[in-house]
Image: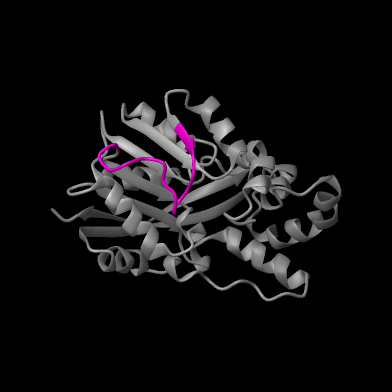
Amino acid sequence: MNGGEPDRWSAVADDWSASWGEVARPAWEALVAAAGIGAGTRVLDVGCGSGEFLAFLAELDAEPLGCDPAPGMLAVAAERCPTAVLRHGGFGSLPWTPGEVDVVVAVNALQFAADPLDAVDEAARLVGSGGRVGIANWAEAELNDLEGIEAALAIADGEEPLPDDILRLAGELADLFSNAGLVDVTDGVVPGTWVAPDDDALVAAVLVGEDADGLAARRDDVLTAAHRLRLADGSTRLATAFRWSVGTVAR
């Protein structure tokens, strides 16, 4: 699925949240620290999905704002973080005006923008002079075990695995921020782990959005691809990594 398919994202909102909602926590922590987010900071999460990052921000006493193009995701987010101000939208149509937001963040959402540079420019205009923009994306495939599983599934289907998006590579987010005129740009990579407690959870997560027949048809392919990651207790542990960058709008 992609950002141009909000109806499909809406349909899988609960399942996606159950499997993947917390996977980016290391990236949230990195963005919060680098952007100086704390009590009272007005933070807009673009592509907020099912609202886990918003709830994390609320725990810090920040003021969480969220937008997403998928109404089903916003519905889940509203339940998860009742204090968040939620609006329909995404990069290209951020539904706030300059002066209402201190920091714009996005986690695994920038790739859905029509033009990443325009998206960062839009975020910078929204936060204004001295405001901050923070982006985190999956890092390159070699650092994420999920990518190896998806590559194996593509090969099993007779397809070529997708190449890394350029913004997943070292230094590319920071370069994008600099090209957008942001200053004091910092970046990094944060590792993590994601654990499926059993085979059913693993298959459901990798094939999120598939119906029962689709899950059954691809089950063996998923388990074969993930076999080396299986632990003695029957769980499967995937290494994850996210690249992030934070920059400040010049005064």
Q: Position of residue 129 (x, y in %)?
A: 18, 49
158 to 96, vertically: above or below = below
> Which of these two is toward me, 184 or 23?
184
Q: Position of residue 60 (x, y in %)?
A: 32, 29
> Which quadrant is the N terminus positioned in?
bottom right
Q: Residue at x 72, y 48 (%)?
A: 209
> Which of these two is toward me, 196 or 75?
75
- All told, the count of numbered labels is 0
Q: Which residues are magenta?
A: 86-100
Drawn side of residue 47 relative to residue 103, left or right: right
Q: Main secondary structure of the magenta part?
A: loop
11 to 219, vertically: above or below = above
40 to 147, vertically: above or below = above
Is 225 a magenta residue?
no
Q: Residue at x 59, y 38 (%)?
A: 71
Q: Position of residue 58 (x, y in %)?
A: 38, 28
Q: Residue furthest top?
A: 82
Report which quarter residue 168 is drawn in.
Answer: bottom left
Is 99 a magenta residue?
yes
Q: Position of residue 16 (x, y in %)?
A: 63, 42
Q: Residue at x 47, y 48 (%)?
A: 90
Q: Residue at x 66, y 46 (%)?
A: 7
Report which quarter residue 183 is drawn in.
Answer: bottom left
What colouring method underlies this structural image? one colour
87 to 111, vertically: above or below = above
Drawn side of residue 64 relative to residue 216, left or right: left
Drawn side of residue 27 relative to residue 8, left or right: left
Is any part of residue 244 visible from this angle? no
Report which quarter residue 247 is drawn in.
Answer: bottom left
Is any part of residue 221 visible from this angle? yes
